[in-house]
């Protein structure tokens, strides 16, 4: 038996080659400023930028104008109370709706609170009184702030009125007619319903996948541009097997992205005090298949990249789609079946779902079992496709070499 | 150079550009497939306007006819669907962590008895703030249900005591808020999001294509040939190059416009013209920013990275989801550097609210103002085109 065919020799050579490819790919990454942008700069800066943009979490002092036709003690009390809430600020009292509308047109305010002339009269007669709220719908958060503040103040005023209106009855009886069934609402896991706490964790996960796709795609494109035959696999003794290439390269990416993940998923949330209630071990165990799936998906896609710039042109815009398909803002129950199926092609979909539930809602792996399994399956499938891509590329480059060799041989014969 | 000669040069460059655009499939993908894909995706995703039948769990500690009736009524709300009934809160919370429900409605023990005997049992409801849209919609339904439950009990006891409905309602809820959501009374999320997301995608693709089409001239050393075709005038060469792209992107923008305001009949209180003009200005303003990007970083990959990052940040910083006024003052200032921001403000004034053009003219002016950018960077870019050696 020849030395080359012994299993022990093959394994030994394979491991050596894997490490050779790992080192080679590591060099490729650090030599290429374009790749460095996507592997380090973007994962470093983007989380900071997004956290900074949404840092205020909720809107404070949404500007409102008031039209007070009633001009009574009660309406003034109401206005004072609305102004006192953290969410809303009353910037002006207008004489009529015309003037108030003009304030909205000029963007000096985003909502109008209108008290009809019979407001106070109705209340004193014991009839239900109405205040009208008009909202500019350019920002839903303004609308929400106005609605919550006015509802809250209405309830409060109502309570006070009822206490005054029923002086004769005993306190206990009075309560019964007034408020037979009180209620309380609790926002779980993101107690102030903050925007950063809701969106940033999802963006953090998405950034990991997208930068991997862009960076690895760029490495693939560059390799093909530099290669004489426009092949992904260089002609070298070390690149002589599918598994060693796939293992060697993915080892590079994994090592780099461990650093990225620690930054994006552990440090950034701490810096901006975003919710972080997940067990660190759970997060790590969950992120592992996510990284594998993203890396193998990226390696598969990189097989189709013919130039170093094409990944940016093709994949950047998909981030917007992937964020929505993940079901973090638009609920997954409302996503049409076709798009839901498309969503399962990308690790970001289960990745975002699982991560936010672990990180923000304190779920364990048991509760995210569905997402966890999906990620492992994706990792497996994309591992196979990545191997197929590289197998195909190895065969192709071999064929091209042989062709070239024959061509050169023929030429030499003719020249003789 | 006479005018005729100039036009001729532009025409030559434009012909050359059309040839370049049609010979590379990547252009077809970026200019046509990607924007159309996004239009189809987002409009079909949010076709219903509001998500319906969002799952909640009910913890029914009472188990009486009254509580069952309450659950039935809650289930009947359009946005709410009761998918899980349990007698322990822990179960419900676990369902929430599993992502199976977004809300929990808690009915306490002996609810029915206490409500009728005036012991004031408290209804509690919990929403999962991790999913903001689902949480706020469910909050609304569960709150309405709680208020209604209180009202119905109040009415029963009140009527028994001989009061009229008017009197009782005046007692139960002395002040009600009557809400008018101007321009989007259905609170339609598709209207709210897609009017900005889709032009945002367009802006991103324009950045990328503009940078790519100029950057490849540098990378493959065809820049001199390009300038020669344009009669060695940088301005004419640039115009000729961008013009075919302007036409294609404007057509795509109009397509997007007709999908939004024609096919989907989103609010268009201003009529078509102000929005069509705004979209056209968005196209050319984005092209100008694209030229600026490749001018500042005259390397294809750096220019494209810049375009990608800037184009993606736009979605957050224009403030259609989280208002700009709620951001840090530095970010408020930065937001003006994005054409999409000004387009968004025009959209709010014109299509959404139908305001006088007078109120938006500054935003139109801003969009036109972006056209100065290529002139600022022109010299730098021209030098790069003539003397720059591509370093891979």
Image (cartoon, rainbow, N blue to C red):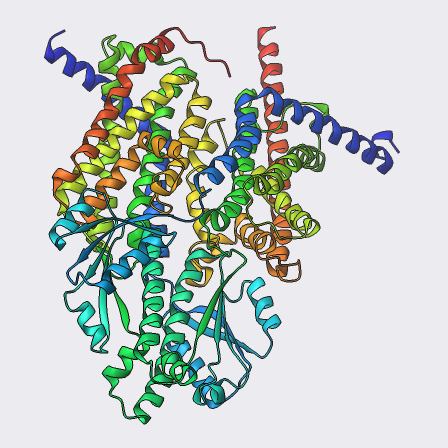
Residue A303 visible in the snapshot: no
Question: Viewer-proximal residue, A81 or A114?
Answer: A81
Q: Residue furthest front?
A: A168
Question: Viewer-proximal residue, B335 or A216?
Answer: B335
User: Along the horizontal axis of the image, is B76 left or right of B8?
Assistant: right
Q: Position of residue A71 (x, y in %)?
A: 17, 60
User: Along the horizontal axis of the image, is A202 left or right of B292?
Assistant: right
Q: Residue shown at 42%/56% (left/top)?
A: A330
Q: Residue shown at 34%/89% (left/top)?
A: B156
- Number of numbered discs on residues: 0
Q: Residue furthest right?
A: A1
The image quadrant that residue A354 belongs to is bottom right
For the N terminus of chain B, the image quarter is: top left
Q: Position of residue B166 (x, y in %)?
A: 23, 82
Does residue B94 lie above or below A109 as drawn? Answer: below
Question: Viewer-proximal residue, A363 or A168?
Answer: A168
Q: Position of residue B185 (x, y in %)?
A: 24, 60
Does residue A131 lie above or below A294 as drawn? Answer: below
Q: Position of residue B129 (x, y in %)?
A: 49, 58
Residue A322 visible in the snapshot: yes
The image quadrant that residue B214 belongs to is top left
Question: Viewer-proximal residue, B367 or A163?
Answer: A163
Q: Residue shown at 64%/39% (left/top)?
A: A262
The image quadrant that residue B317 belongs to is top left
Q: Residue shown at 38%/40% (left/top)?
A: B315
């Amino acid at each position: 038996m020849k030395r080359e065919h012994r299993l022990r020799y093959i394994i030994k050579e394979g491991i050596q080659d894997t490490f050779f490819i790992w080192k080679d790919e590591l060099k490729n990454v650090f030599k290429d400023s374009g790749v460095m942008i996507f592997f380090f700069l973007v994962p470093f800066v983007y989380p900071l930028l997004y956290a900074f943009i949404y840092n205020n979490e909720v809107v404070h002092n949404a500007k409102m104008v008031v039209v007070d036709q009633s001009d009574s003690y009660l309406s003034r009390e109401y206005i004072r109370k609305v102004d006192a809430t953290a969410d809303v600020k009353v910037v002006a009292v207008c004489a009529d709706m015309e003037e108030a509308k003009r304030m909205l047109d000029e963007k000096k305010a985003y909502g109008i609170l209108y008290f009809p002339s019979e407001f106070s009269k109705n209340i004193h007669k014991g009839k239900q009184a109405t205040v009208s709220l008009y909202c500019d719908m350019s920002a839903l958060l303004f609308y929400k702030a106005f609605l919550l503040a006015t509802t809250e103040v209405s309830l409060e005023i109502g309570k006070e009125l009822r206490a005054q209106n029923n002086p004769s009855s005993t306190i206990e009886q009075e309560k019964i007619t007034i408020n037979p069934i009180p209620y309380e609402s609790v926002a779980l896991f993101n107690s102030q319903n903050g925007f950063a706490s809701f969106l940033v964790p999802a963006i953090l996960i998405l950034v990991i996948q997208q930068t991997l796709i862009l960076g690895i795609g760029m490495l693939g494109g560059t390799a093909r541009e530099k290669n004489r035959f426009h092949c992904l696999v260089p002609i070298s003794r070390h690149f002589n097997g599918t598994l060693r290439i796939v293992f060697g390269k993915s080892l590079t990416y994994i090592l780099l992205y461990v650093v990225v993940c620690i930054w994006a998923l552990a440090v950034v949330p701490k810096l901006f005090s975003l919710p972080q209630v997940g067990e660190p071990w759970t997060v790590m165990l969950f992120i592992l298949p996510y990284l594998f799936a993203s890396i193998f998906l990226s390696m598969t896609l990189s097989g189709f990249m013919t130039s170093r710039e094409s990944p940016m042109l093709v994949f950047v815009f998909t981030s917007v789609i992937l964020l929505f398909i993940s079901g973090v803002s638009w609920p997954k129950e409302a996503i049409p079946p076709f798009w839901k199926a498309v969503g399962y092609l990308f690790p970001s979909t289960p990745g975002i779902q699982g991560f936010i539930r672990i990180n923000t809602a304190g779920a364990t792996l048991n509760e995210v079992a569905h997402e966890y399994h999906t990620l492992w399956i994706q990792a497996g499938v994309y591992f196979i496709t990545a191997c197929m891509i590289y197998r195909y590329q190895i065969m192709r480059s071999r064929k091209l070499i042989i062709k070239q060799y024959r061509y050169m041989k023929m030429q030499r014969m003719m020249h003789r | 150079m006479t005018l005729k000669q100039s036009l001729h040069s532009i025409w030559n460059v434009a012909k050359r550009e059309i040839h370049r655009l049609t010979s590379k499939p990547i252009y077809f993908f970026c200019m046509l497939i990607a924007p159309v894909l996004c239009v189809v995706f987002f409009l079909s995703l949010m076709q219903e306007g509001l998500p319906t039948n969002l799952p909640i769990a009910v913890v029914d500690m009472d188990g009486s006819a009254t509580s069952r009736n309450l659950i039935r009524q809650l289930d009947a709300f359009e946005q709410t669907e009761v998918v899980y009934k349990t007698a322990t809160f822990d179960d419900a919370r676990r369902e929430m962590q599993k992502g199976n429900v977004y809300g929990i409605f808690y009915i306490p023990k002996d609810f029915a008895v206490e409500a009728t005997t005036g012991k004031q049992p408290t209804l509690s409801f919990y929403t999962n703030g991790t999913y903001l849209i689902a949480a706020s919609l469910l909050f609304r339904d569960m709150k309405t249900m709680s208020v209604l439950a209180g009202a119905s009990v109040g009415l029963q006891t009140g009527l028994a005591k001989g009061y009229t409905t008017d009197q009782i309602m005046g007692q139960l809820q002395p002040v009600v808020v009557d809400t008018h959501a101007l321009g989007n009374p259905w609170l339609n999320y598709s209207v709210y999001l897609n009017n900005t997301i889709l032009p945002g995608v367009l802006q991103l693709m324009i950045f990328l294509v503009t940078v790519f089409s100029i950057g490849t001239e540098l990378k493959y050393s065809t820049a001199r040939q390009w300038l020669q075709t344009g009669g060695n005038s940088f301005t004419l060469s640039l115009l000729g190059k961008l013009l075919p792209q302007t036409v294609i992107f404007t057509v795509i923008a109009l397509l997007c416009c007709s999908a939004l305001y024609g096919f989907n009949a989103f609010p268009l209180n201003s009529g078509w013209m102000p929005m069509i003009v705004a979209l056209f200005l968005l196209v050319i303003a984005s092209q100008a920013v694209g030229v600026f990007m490749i001018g500042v970083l005259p390397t294809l990959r750096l220019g494209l990275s810049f375009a990608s990052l800037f184009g993606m940040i736009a979605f957050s910083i224009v403030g259609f989801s989280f208002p700009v006024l709620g951001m840090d003052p530095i970010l408020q200032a930065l937001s003006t550097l994005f054409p999409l921001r000004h387009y968004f403000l025009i959209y709010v004034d014109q299509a959404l609210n139908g305001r006088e053009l007078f109120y938006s003219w500054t935003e139109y002016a801003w969009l036109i103002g972006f056209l100065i950018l290529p002139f600022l960077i022109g010299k730098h870019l021209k030098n790069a085109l003539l003397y720059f050696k591509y370093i891979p």
